[in-house]
Image (cartoon, rainbow, N blue to C red):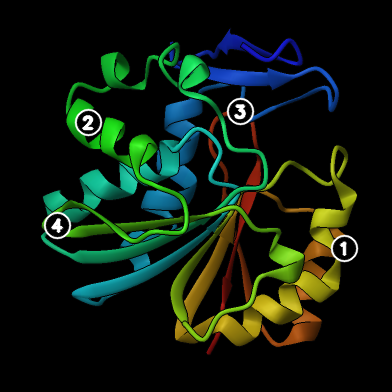
Amino acid sequence: MNNNISIQTTSDGSTTLFVAELNETYHSTHGAIQEAKHVFIENGIKLIDKKEISVLEVGFGTGLNAILTSHFSQKENKTIDYVGLETVPLGMDIINKLNYLSEDTELSKNDFIKIHECNWKKKCNIHDNFYLTKKDSEIQSYKTNDFYDVVYYDAFGPRAQGEMWDKSIFENLYNLINEGGILVTYCAMGQFKRDLKSIGFEVNCVPGPPGKREMTIANKL
């Protein structure tokens, strides 16, 4: 396993990864699974009233958001086309040490393995309702003709990676979101929200997951 990355157990019992170089964890230390569910499922994709939904995730990471969304697609019988961007793909030696499946027995081990064994840049059918394309691409240089109903913005925080929160990124993302679509993230910093408003998003702050007072939902009206 990469010496720069270690596994930590969070307050809800689920694991996350700590990156020593950035002094940052992939998920909240107050609970990796409950944070991901709260931010990206309960206050993200659940808000989209469509049978077929397109998702762009910035920061694919451990695949936690993807497996939770895959489970959501089966539970709600919605067809989801999911694109995940990640510039530092994790090896299976790290993935196999995570405990997401034991923490939430509703999640499918078979689907989680498929998500991580799926070839990069190739669209994979994880199950009847969930399609995944993983792309080794920076959001700053990401080019596509596709449009999305939901953007999961799950990059490392502004303190660790300030360049990931530059206004120009969200200007480009605004143009990739369908009318009525949303950008959702755990971040609720004041300058970030002011930037979103100046771009044209309607910004809503809602209660965050445990350990975080607020999170952000940005609507493209």
Residue situated in front as seen by the camera: 122 or 15: 122
Residue on which disc 3 sits: 28
Q: Tell me whether circle 1 and circle 3 mark residues in contact (CB < 8 Å).
A: no
Q: Earlier in the sequence, mark 3 or mark 2?
A: 3
Residue depicted at x 70% and y 87%: 200
Residue depicted at x 69% and y 18%: 18
Q: Earlier in the sequence, mark 4 or mark 2?
A: 4
Residue situated in front as seen by the camera: 27 or 62: 62
Q: Is residue 214 above or below residue 167?
A: above
Query: So how many labels did they put on this image?
Result: 4
Q: CA distance from mark 3 to mark 4?
A: 26 Å
Q: Tell me whether circle 1 and circle 4 mark residues in contact (CB < 8 Å).
A: no
Residue on which disc 4 sits: 76
Query: Comparing marks 1 and 4, which lies closer to the viewer?
Result: 4
Query: Comparing marks 4 and 2, which lies closer to the viewer?
Result: 2
**Residue type at tag 2:** Leu
Left or right relative to 91: residue 49: left
Q: Is residue 148 above or below residue 119?
A: below
**Residue type at tag 1:** Gln
Using the rendered view, name the quadrant where residue 165 is placed: bottom right
Q: In the drawing, what numbered circle is on residue 50?
A: none
Using the rendered view, name the quadrant where residue 67 is placed: top left
**Residue type at tag 4:** Glu
Q: Secondary structure at mark 4?
A: helix
Q: x, y (%) of residue 37? A: 40, 40
Position of the N terminus by quadrant? top right
Q: Secondary structure at mark 1?
A: helix
**Residue type at tag 3:** Ser
Q: In the drawing, what numbered circle is on residue 191?
A: 1
Residue on which disc 2 sits: 107
